[in-house]
Image (tube, grey):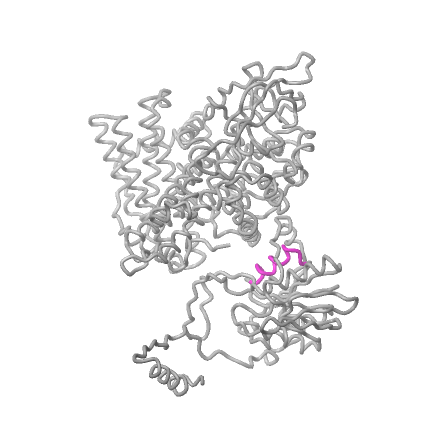
Amino acid sequence: MKIVVCLKQVPARDSLLRLNSAGTWIQETDISFEVNEPDIYALEEALRLKESQGGEVVVCSLGPARAQQAIKEALAKGADRALHLDDPAFANLDSFGIARAMAKALDAEKPDLIVTGLQSDDFGAAQTGVILAELMGLPHSTIIMAIEVQGSAIKVKRELEAGFFQFIEMSLPALLTIQSGINKPRYATLKGIMAAKNKPLKKLGMADLGLSAADLAPRQKFTRVYVPEKRSKTEFFEGGGKDVAAKLVDKLKNEARVL
Amino acid sequence: MATATATPQTLIKGGSFLIEDRSPDEIFTPEDLTDQHRLIGQTGREFMEQEVLPHLDEMEAKKPGLLRELLRKAADVGLCGSDVPQKYGGLELDKISSIIISEEMARDGAWAATLGAQQGIGILPIAFFGTEAQKAKYVPKLASAEWVGAYCLSEATSASDALNAKTRAVLSPDGRHYVLNGTKHWITNGGIADVYVVFAKVDGEKFSAFIVERAFAGVSPGAEEHKMGIRGSSTTPVNLENAEVPVENVLGEVGKGHLIAFNILNMGRLKLGAGCIGGAKHLFAEAVKWAKEREAFGHPIADFGLIKEKLGEMVVRIYAAESMCYRTTGMIDGMLHGIDQSAPDAGRQILKALEQYAVECSILKVVGTEVLDFVTDETVQIYGGYGFSSDYPIERVYRDQRVNRIFEGTNEINRLLITDMLLKRSMKGELGLIPAAQRLRDEILGAPAFEEAGEDGLLADEARLVAGAKKIVLLVAGSAVQRYLQALADEQEIVAVLSNLCMDVYGMESALLRTLKKARSTSEDECATEIAATRAFVYEAADRMESEARRALGRISEGDNLRAELAVVRRFLRRNPPDTIELKRAAADRAIALNRYPLIEPR
């Protein structure tokens, strides 16, 4: 089974975040980066599938040179090889652009299964995986809790709301976005870390993928990023129970507009 | 070496920091760590968080089997064989990787001691000094933690003076065994080990090492010691009552046990120093978080000057210690580079390289343990009553860390060693301290140099102060040797002053070079905290050195001579002190903003 794990490098969770001067994103100097946490669960799921089914795990990541740290971590944990999509033109892509570049790279791989984390810790759009599936013409399913291989197909458990689950049988190849917390991710052994440096890591730029800047043009942009402004205030009603209840209903209807 | 480090390949003599100048490019700094180093640190951190820290209470309660289980898990990750040749089941990591592991493991003192006894003093004597047969038999099983190892040097009445051991070994009449009698004390992993490296005197004279299996007749560990700290680790006596040890289990040569006993300690000191510095960084993060959460008078206590002063001082001291540690380890890796670890004599070559930096290893042991001691004490203070309560974790850390100043050679012994080794090397002509002291004397007697008109640039004043500080060491050492000659060893207080001076010089220069190196590859703005920490350390070290030099010279010299020497001290340490309160506040503010020790990225 050939499994591709798409993973992203994101700012570390305990970073001190400051907005950039344009107010459109955070300053990336002076912060450290780590593997997007949901993607770590996807990687673990892929490694377990490889252990039970045999085959190969390929890591695919789009990002600047620093993303190699994330790729090496995945290789150290047991992925077999990696594709690093790195090109100055890949800076500031939206979910569509990232998916488009990845689709080009992964079409050639012809994987049986692609897994990603449910969403990224930085943008949290949960879009890249599903757009990638659409671009590649693959069936997909999101928020996956468990994967069971059944011959050339899979049965997956998908989380719905309010404690409900959906079980879906899917043909392969397919793409799944993995829910966080479904497994206990392994840590890299020192031997794995040593072995990682000899594993193939292929760099692919825009030209290698046969894409132009126009193909990747963002379809969305950030106009302003800001720290939430505090606007709520607490109001105390005085008087008897009936009066207070009436005032409350009035406020909820006419000010908060939730009734 | 299996790991390529960015270590500069200049071979630098141990102790030469006192008389030679280095450029920033020549030293290894934490900023030079590779992706591989960072991943090793991350694995260490995750191992601690997932496997060790959740079990601290069970460890403290001595849950049977737990330490062995944790050692097995550590071995599966590769942590037990990090310094062992690949041929014997190890990973042959570079020493930068080893100290990164030590830094992470040190989040719990009991665990750090347990693992350290296994992967360091447990395995390495055999891996470095064993015969092929001994290595093949013992090292792979120790690296995989199928067997647990321990190192038995101390006795009830000999520890720092280990060569006074009373344990005796006598060859059996048939010449097939040595029969050992005696009791070794304070043995880490004593209660759980399968293999002991035991030091004993053959016929009560020839100090020698033996590989002793617990299964041998007459070998038994005693009861667990009741300790102030690291209660989760096993510490017992090991009793040898007519213990029969096959002659093929003599480690190294009969009568040459001291080579093993003392050389192996250099690595132990390096790793203990590194571990303490790592532990201090982890603890510091807890102190910062607490200071931000705890409120008094309507403010988080982190807002208050006296708390910031503590945090700032911690950052400054950790920064200097960390700079010394990575610099030293980088030099060791430079020296180890190119040694074929599968060669039969590889172990001896490795230990020889470590011996070259024995002075620096002792410095790190003392500095690392004293930095952690300081950081722990101030963290208890910041926690206030909660630091004193056993319901909070800091109380345990306070008890656990106390032993660090005692084991791997007490800090007093290491202070004596630092000066002793430096002087011995210069007597042998290996280190040019004597000619340098002579040149200094000529300089003092000659016309005043135009040294004040030095270069400008980043930290130029501090660089001049470091150069002056080196001269202070030569001045005091020269006077002391001239006055006491061979009897200097009896003037232990002065010997310790000399070591203190050396430690401060090494710290000043290491912090300075590291900051300059980072500033070259980034910008002064990005190094603002590093610059603040360096300046605070350099000036306060100069204060300490001036006071220490006066103390020593006050005993060594008198009259006009003393007055002249004190004038020279003032001249070499002439300085316009900066606002160190502001420098430390800046360091503290950065830590408060980041919730951690601010001068190295977290793993």
Q: In the displayed structure, does residue B497 sit left or right of residue A173?
A: left
What x and y, as percent, mark residue B537?
34, 46
B460 and B535: which is toward the camera: B535
Q: In the displayed structure, does residue B247 sit left or right of residue B560?
A: right
Question: Toward which corner of the image does residue B414 lie, by quadrant?
Answer: top left
Residue located farthest toward the top when viewing the structure as drawn = B173
Q: In the displayed structure, does residue A64 sit left or right of residue B327?
A: right
Tell me how many marks there are: 0
B603 and B554: which is toward the camera: B603
Main SS category, magenta section: helix
Vertical side of A150 occupied by B533: above or below: above
What x and y, as percent, mark residue B287?
39, 51
Q: Residue at x 44, y 61 (%)?
A: A30
What x and y, as percent, mark residue A116?
63, 68
Q: Residue at x 73, y 73 (%)?
A: A170
Question: Toward which corner of the image does residue B302 lie, by quadrant?
Answer: bottom left
Q: Name the quarter where the N terminus of chain B is drawn.
A: top right
Residue located farthest toward the right when viewing the structure as drawn = A151
Q: Residue at x 44, y 40 (%)?
A: B400
Q: In the displayed structure, does residue A109 sit left or right of residue B130?
A: right
Tell me, yes or no, whether the highlighted magenta stretch contains residue A74: yes
What x and y, as percent, mark residue B85?
64, 39
Residue located farthest toward the bottom when viewing the structure as drawn = A254
Residues in magenta? Answer: A67-79
